[in-house]
Image (cartoon, helix red, strand yellow):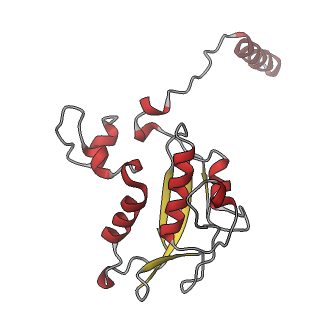
């Protein structure tokens, strides 16, 4: 009985080796619904221990980066750090050209990190979509004018129309609107 079972398993294994399998082919990035995409990301992308400069992380081809922010209600800027709410500790720099972003002082504010991303995207127009996970470490200080709307305004002011917003997902191709983000994603929008 054991010999027959082993022979059957061996036959199945051999058959699985000779059955032709269709090779998987990735859909072009612009043809894939957002809900169907799988991304590879870099946790705490802004930390200098992993990359000297934020653009070096982008150079890896990652499709998701994470930036932790802390609201500073006195300066009205978001600090970027893993565990230092009162100071910046990151690999973001300043500069208007790609070459500028591989040198210089680091430890800049969230807006500067977004500028780094914009300059990199401008220099790499054929790069795929990039997801940016923003993690408010202390939450958002909405009562002090540093809430979701202010983060959204900063992102839009620095990245412009490069940002895929929830409203973009809700918009139907025929001009109507889905009732919810879930409905839009499930419809393949």
Give the percent coordinates (x, y) of residue 33.
40, 35
Identified at 69% across, 59% down, the residue is: 102
Quarter of the figure with the N terminus: top right
The image quadrant of residue 100 is bottom right
Q: Picture coordinates of residue 25 (x, y %)?
A: 57, 23
Q: Nearer the viewer, residue 19 or 141?
A: 141
The foreground one among 185 and 66 is: 66
Query: Residue 52: which quarter of the image?
Result: bottom right
Vertical comparison of 90 with 189: above or below: below
In the image, farthest residue toward the right: 3
Instruction: Tell me: residue 4, above or below residue 113.
Output: above
**Who's the residue at 23% across and 37% down the image?**
172
Residue 47 lies left or right of residue 143; in this view the side is right
State which quadrant residue 92 falls in.
Answer: bottom right
Quadrant for the C terminus, please. Answer: top left
Rendered view: 71 above or below 67? below
Q: Quick check: 144 above or below 172?
A: below
| Image label count | 0
In the displayed orientation, state which residue is furthest to the left. 176
- Residue at the image position 41 percent from the left and 48 percent from the top: 162
Where in the figure is residue 35, as x and y percent of width and height?
A: 41, 41
């Amino acid at each position: 009985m054991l010999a027959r079972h082993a022979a059957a398993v061996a036959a199945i294994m051999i058959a699985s080796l000779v059955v032709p399998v269709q090779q998987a082919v990735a859909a072009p990035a612009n043809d894939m619904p957002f809900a169907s995409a799988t991304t590879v990301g870099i946790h705490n992308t802004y930390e200098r221990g992993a990359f000297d400069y934020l653009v070096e992380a982008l150079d890896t081809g990652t499709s998701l980066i994470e930036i932790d922010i802390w609201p500073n209600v006195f300066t009205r800027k978001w600090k970027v750090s893993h565990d230092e709410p009162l100071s910046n500790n990151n690999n973001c720099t300043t500069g208007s050209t790609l070459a500028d972003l591989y040198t210089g002082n680091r430890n800049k504010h969230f807006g500067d990190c977004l500028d780094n991303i914009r300059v990199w995207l401008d220099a790499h127009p054929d790069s795929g979509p990039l997801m940016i996970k923003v993690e408010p470490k202390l939450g958002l200080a909405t009562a002090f004018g540093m809430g979701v709307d202010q983060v959204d305004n900063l992102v839009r002011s620095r990245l412009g129309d490069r940002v895929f917003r929830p409203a973009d997902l809700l918009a139907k191709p025929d001009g109507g609107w889905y009732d919810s983000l879930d409905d839009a994603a499930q419809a393949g929008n």
